[in-house]
C-alpha cells in the first residue's frame, strides 16, 4: 500500500525565515513524488515534481529514497507563499496512475 | 483553454436524494480522476476513467457511488441516496496522457453538503 504523511498540519514562520515542509512516504516500488499547492480561493495546482529537479518560486524538494522523504524547502519565505501544500505520490507501475495525497500542511508566513 | 471545469460548485442535498457532479476535462485530455476531500483531510482517490471506460475504481465505495465518462459530454460522479457522511469537497482532475509522472490538472471542486 502507498501512503504519504505530512506530520505538520500548520507551519507558521516569519517573512524571510527558512521553510521546510516535511513529507514522508511509503511505497514498495519506484514512486513519482509531487508537491501541489492551493492558494486562497484558487484551485489545486502543481508546484513541482521530483523528476523535473526544478526550483519553482524558490522552492526545491529532494527525493531521499533512504529516508523515504520528499521535504519541500525554501530559504526565505515570502508572504505570498501562504497556502495549503500537499505532498503526493504516484506509483510508477500503478495502472491507475492515481495520486495518493498527504493530509496537507498550511503554511502561514507572517509579516 | 479554460482548464478543468466542475459544476455545480456548491450542491446541497437532503438525506436520501441523489447528487450528480459534473466534470469537463481540459481540451485534449482523455484521462479523468475523481478525488474526495473530507473536512481537515487530504484528497483521497476515488476513480480513474478514460473515455467510455472505468480503469480503476478501487477508491470508490461499492454502494451508492458510480462514475461515467461518456464518449460525448462531461464525466459524471453520481451519488445515490446521499447520507451526511457524503458531505465533502469532490475534485476532478484530468491529464493528457497516462503515466505516473504526468501532471494532473485540477478543477475547482464541488462542495457537497448533505442536510
Image (cartoon, grey):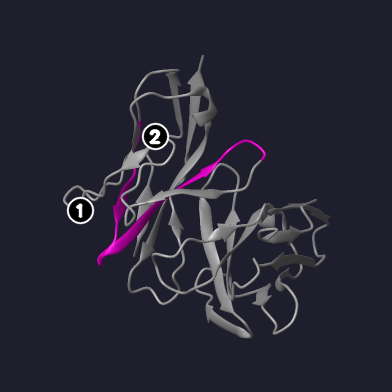
Please give the residue where the numbered disc 2 appears in the rendered image: A58
Which element type, helix, strand or loop, lies under badge 2?
loop
Q: Would you call the spot at circle 2 few (<14 residues within 10 Å), some (14-19), or many (20 or more)? A: few
Seen as rendered, the residue at the extreme left is A66
Please give the residue where the numbered disc 1 appears in the rendered image: A65
Say whether disc 1 or disc 2 marks the residue closer to the N-terminus.
Answer: 2
Q: Is residue A5 above or below residue B3?
A: above
Q: Is residue B61 left or right of residue A103?
A: right
Q: Position of residue B53 (x, y in %)?
A: 59, 85
Q: Is residue A22 magenta?
A: yes
Q: Which chain letter goes with mark 2?
A: A
Q: Which residues are magenta?
A: A20-41
Q: Residue shown at 66%/60% (left/top)?
A: B4
Q: Which chain letter goes with mark 1?
A: A
Q: Residue shown at 51%/43% (left/top)?
A: A37
Q: Is residue B55 above or below residue B12?
A: below
Q: Is residue B72 above or below residue B58?
A: below
Amino acid at each position: 500500500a502507498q501512503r504519504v504523511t505530512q506530520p505538520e498540519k500548520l507551519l507558521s514562520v516569519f517573512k524571510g525565515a527558512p521553510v521546510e515542509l516535511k513529507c514522508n512516504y511509503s511505497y514498495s516500488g519506484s514512486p513519482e513524488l509531487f508537491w501541489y499547492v492551493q492558494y486562497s480561493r484558487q484551485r489545486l495546482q502543481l508546484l513541482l515534481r521530483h523528476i523535473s529537479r526544478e526550483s519553482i518560486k524558490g522552492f526545491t524538494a529532494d527525493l531521499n529514497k533512504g529516508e523515504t522523504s520528499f521535504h519541500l524547502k525554501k530559504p526565505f519565505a515570502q508572504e505570498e507563499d501562504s497556502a495549503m501544500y500537499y505532498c503526493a505520490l504516484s506509483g510508477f507501475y500503478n495502472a491507475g496512475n492515481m495520486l495518493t495525497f498527504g493530509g496537507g500542511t498550511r503554511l502561514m508566513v507572517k509579516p | 483553454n479554460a482548464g478543468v471545469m466542475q459544476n455545480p460548485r456548491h450542491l446541497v442535498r437532503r438525506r436520501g436524494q441523489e447528487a450528480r457532479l459534473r466534470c469537463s476535462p481540459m481540451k485534449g485530455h482523455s484521462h479523468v480522476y475523481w478525488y474526495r476531500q473530507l473536512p481537515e483531510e487530504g484528497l483521497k482517490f476515488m476513480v480513474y476513467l478514460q473515455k467510455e471506460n472505468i480503469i480503476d475504481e478501487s477508491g470508490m465505495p461499492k454502494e451508492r457511488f458510480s462514475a461515467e465518462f461518456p464518449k460525448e459530454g462531461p464525466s459524471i460522479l453520481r451519488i445515490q441516496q446521499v447520507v451526511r457522511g457524503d458531505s465533502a469537497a469532490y475534485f476532478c482532475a484530468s491529464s493528457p496522457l497516462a503515466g505516473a509522472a504526468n501532471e494532473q490538472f485540477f478543477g475547482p471542486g464541488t462542495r457537497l453538503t448533505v442536510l
